Amino acid sequence: MDIEISTDPDRLDLDVIHRWLSEESYWAQGRPRELMQRSFDNSICFGAYLGGRQVGFARVVTDRATFAWLADVFILDAYRGRGYGKTLVAAVLAHPELQGLRRWLLATKDAHGLYEQNGFTPVPDGRFMERLIKP
């Protein structure tokens, strides 16, 4: 069965997404559903589906002109190791509204190999800074 990638917000299974991000991810533990929904409303969201069931997700925060931040990428544990993550990231990068951007950024603790296959490299130049406010 081939995986299907869609940006239709009506297809997103918010229960699956919220549960995985708030309980399974290392970066969004405990994130309230209302906050998550607001982030989805202001991003381009990608659902990954097998037989109509959501098995993965990614979102892009972007101005659709020069910059994009790839965030909240996951494939449910039971579906990993089948290339679905590669397909999802490739679909994100090929999206028509995201062509011609000058810079893409993301943060990952454990998926460097996946992103390197798509042209991402570490940011060593020291120009980037962050302002992190802990909850």
Image: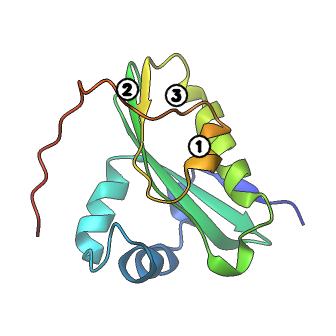
| Amino acid tagged 3 | Leu
N-terminal label among 3 and 2:
2
- Residue in the foreground of this view, choosing between 83 and 98: 83
Say above or below: 2 vs 65.
below
**Kind of residue sitting beneath label 1:** Tyr
Please give the name of the residue rendered at 24% of the width and 76% of the height, measured from the top-left corner. Answer: 32
The residue identified by callout 3 is 98
Q: Which residue is mark 2?
A: 67
Residue 57 pos. (x, y %): 55, 61
**Residue at x 38% of width, y 71% of height:** 26
Give the structural element (helix, strand or loop) at label 3. helix
Marks 3 and 2, how far apart at CA: 9 Å
| Residue contact between numbered discs 2 and 1, judged by CB atoms under 8 Å | no
Q: Identify the residue at horizontal 63%, vertical 48% (top origin).
A: 113
- Mark nearer the N terminus (2 vs 1): 2
Q: Quadrant of the N terminus?
A: bottom right
Which is in the foreground here, disc 3 or disc 2? 2
Q: Is residue 123 above or below residue 31?
A: above
Q: Secondary structure at mark 1?
A: helix
| Depth order, front residue of 31/107 | 107
Query: CA gap, disc 2 to disc 1?
Result: 17 Å
Element marked by disc 2? strand
On the image, the x and y values in percent for residue 121 come to 51, 32
**In this rendering, position of residue 108 left or right of residue 120:** left
